Amino acid sequence: MTQSGALELRGLTQVHAAGQPPALDDFTLDVPAGSCVAVLGPSGSGKSTVLRLTAGLDEPTRGSVRLDGRDLIGVPPERRGMAMVFQRPLLFPHLSVRDNVAFADRVRGVPRRRARERAEEYLGLVALGGYGDRPARALSGGQEQRVALARALAAEPRVLLLDEPFSALDTALREEMHDLLADLRVRLDPTVLLVTHDHGEADALADTVAVLDGGRLQQAGPVRELYARPASLAVSRLLGGRTEVPGTVRDGVHTSALGALALPGPVPDGPGVLVVRPEAVRVTLPADPAADVTGTVVRVRRRGLRALVAVEVPGPGGVSVEAELEAGEELPAGRAVGLVLAVAARAVVPPLGPPSSPTDAEASPVRPR
Amino acid sequence: MGLTARLGRTALAGWLLLPLVPLVLWAAADRWTAPAVLPQAWGTAGLRDAVDAGAGPAFLRSTVLGLVVAVLATPLGAMAGRALATSRVPLGGAVLAVLLSPLVLPPFAVALGLDVLLLRLRVPAPVGVVLLLTVAALPYTTVLMRAAYAAHDLGFEEEARTLGATARQTVFHVQLPLLAPALAGAAFLAFLVGWSDYVVTLLVGGGQLVTLPLLVAAAATATGNEAQVAVLSLSSVLPPLVLLVAVGLVGRRGRA
């Protein structure tokens, strides 16, 4: 197995047409050897552009791509030592499954028999050992993606580039592919740069996540850190956060329609939006003295055994907080409940647009909970 | 297959093959006078007369002409088709109109006019014929390949490049195999243009390049020998039919 490479993206910028906003703006990211970094962003955020520039399929307007310290400017895609798996499997229809996987070897000049032997090894790695003779067209969607993965790995790339490779698969298949990728990471230790719009997938697969929105890097770091301390509202939303409470911060206390809530770390004074993940909000009785706020259940969204409830808290602007229920717990809409917002999970992000107006609660200071 | 579809297919086959029946009968007839339904005497006189008139060399010349036109017009049409389908060609509509213009210009007028120019430039007759017929075949190959490239997913080529294939290797290992059915179809059309042409070969060839259509026309305008004409006509029809079957097989293998 070829040594996995360390990738450095520095100030990558891609402008398609003069006068239009850049598809990618000053993007900088480090992908250490052997690690898996996910670029997370909505459609149109420029994440596919990151991969295309890294692979050499497009030339950046500015910036550089470095592999193990060597600048790849002007190096054509076939000599970069990277392999890419796209959203569509793109298996060559005129070749059998084995010849597809052996493609990288054949174009390198490896003799046919040796290339096919190696292809069999890689097919075994993705648990498709007996499928070598089948025509590439005779496979199901999940099998096709596995062959595409085997084909990319058979090229023994220094960096593996994955462009939303599992988003076209159904949930069960996607989980299987996640397990497969985790297994392959253990066995082959490749460097992986993955692009996705699903924060759950980024969480499951990657060591660090870079959040991209509108072509600009919003935040990069380990996933846990992004969940706990999102740097902006965009990051919080992209990671699935739905509770946003506008208010003001003073002396480490966030004041809003929910009341005064202490914050776990130092936050600069001024307007700020409180975000809390639903997993960190516990539902209890309204009379519970531990409850930070009380409100009424307005919506219940079933999601496996743990449902998500939206609780509306009375106050100006109709603020709603989402909470995750215990396994099997049931709450009808209209029930009055109390919410406990774990202190460590409270985060404040800068608001979008003009600052919010001061709330009534700020006029009469209340002791923070 | 439903009954209507089967009836439709039989009717279509019959409609296409029926005109060949009198030709087949005439080709094997020594004597056939009205009002007899079938020839009175069967024989190979027609075949002998056709061979005597030079059917063999004419057949060879037609084949070579068709092949040369196919070899020249198919790559040119493929390149034009790819450019028009995938990249933003400046004034693409105008370029396409120019490439399609041989379809609308009357061949007789064009050939007559260009013949003078070719003679002045001392271009040898066969070269002139090949040049004009290649241009005449370009509309067919361009339009066919443009449609093929529009349906072709460039992602295959990008994937091949990231796997380590150079641009040249991508063309041979990925692009051409995927487009083989369309290329076969385009080559077949170009071959037909070269094989079946009469006006350009007659005018620019100056009567010296005797291909099969010229021979058929000469024999048909002469009086009396229907059997000879029938043999010559049949030998004009059969090779394209054989090629059509071959192209169909390539197409099916590309799709299966």
Image (cartoon, coloured by chain):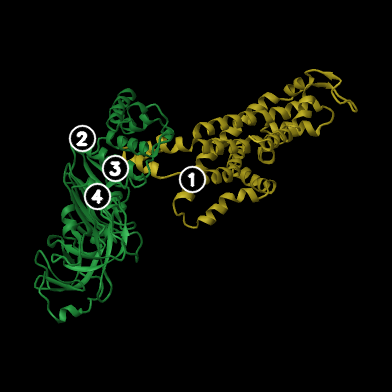
Chain colours: A green, B yellow
Amino acid bearing label 2: Leu
Question: Foreground mark, 4 or 2?
Answer: 4
Say which label, 4 or 2, has the lower sequence index: 2
Q: Residues within 10 Å of mark 4 (few under 14, many from 20)?
A: many
Mark pair 4, 2: CA separation: 20 Å
Mark pair 1, 2: CA separation: 37 Å
Question: Foreground mark, 4 or 3?
Answer: 3
- Name the mark on residue A188: 2
Where residue A260 appears, x then y in whole percent?
14, 72
Secondary structure type for disc 4: helix
Vertical placement of B71 versus A164: above or below?
A: above
Question: Foreground mark, 1 or 2?
Answer: 2
Q: How many marks?
A: 4
In this view of the protein, which residue sits in the foreground, A70 or B132? A70
Where residue A37 appears, x then y in whole percent?
21, 48
Amino acid bearing label 1: Ala
Which residue, given by chain and number where applicable, does mark 4 sit on? A202
| Tag 4 subunit | A
Give the residue at x 34% y 56%: A43
Give the residue at x 56% y 37%: B185
